[in-house]
Image (cartoon, rainbow, N blue to C red):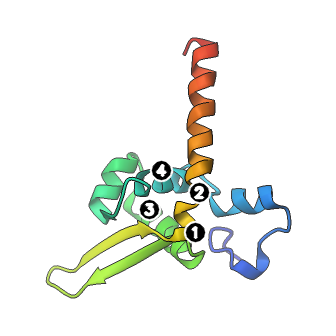
């Protein structure tokens, strides 16, 4: 089984482990961070996340959509337009991202980085 495509029925019982499974890599955390600012098209998201390949971004967005964190909206036009946004469940990760930001800022201050 692809660990990026973790169906809801196989999520761990431990809440911390479950959260880590859902935002399991730096790309997912950065996707959530950037979509907390609002809806983005694929190219905008790729630029804002930075350093991610198209293939990796697509795989992570699909997995996050399957897990109910991201909403993908396709507009029937030529060329097709696709927009990504967070679902209410995805937006509920704001406190996690904010806590990570605060911790990182504190670490940077204490370490003189």
Local crowd size for mark 4, using a 10 Å CA cut-off: few (<14), some (14–19), many (≥20): many
Identify the residue position indicated by label 4 in the image.
33
Q: Nearer the viewer, mark 1 or mark 3?
A: 1
Residue at the right extreme of this rendering? 13
Check contact, mark 4 vs mark 2: CB within 8 A. no
Q: Is residue 81 left or right of residue 32?
A: left
Q: Residue at x 63, y 14 (%)?
A: 111
55 vs 66: above or below: above
Label 4 with label 1: CB-CB less than 8 Å: no
* Residue position marked by numbered label 3 in the rendering: 57
Q: CA distance from mark 3 to mark 4?
A: 14 Å
- Which of the numbered marks, if any, corresponds to residue 89? 1
Contact check, label 1 and label 2, Cβ < 8 Å: yes
Label 1 vs 3, first from the N-terminus? 3
Is residue 113 toward the left or the right of residue 48 in the image? Answer: right
Q: CA distance from mark 1 to mark 3?
A: 20 Å
Relative horizontal placement of residue 38, taking residue 105 as reference (left or right): left
């Amino acid at each position: 089984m692809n660990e990026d495509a973790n169906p809801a029925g196989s999520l761990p019982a431990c809440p911390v482990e479950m959260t880590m499974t859902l935002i399991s890599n730096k790309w997912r955390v950065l996707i959530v961070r950037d979509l907390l600012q609002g809806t983005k098209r694929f190219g905008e998201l790729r630029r804002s996340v930075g350093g991610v390949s198209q293939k990796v971004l697509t795989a992570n967005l699909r997995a996050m959509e399957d897990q109910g964190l991201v909403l993908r909206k396709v507009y029937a036009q030529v060329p097709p337009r696709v927009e990504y946004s967070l679902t209410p469940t995805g937006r509920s990760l704001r406190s996690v991202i904010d806590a990570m930001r605060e911790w990182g800022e504190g670490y940077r201050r204490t370490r003189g980085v």
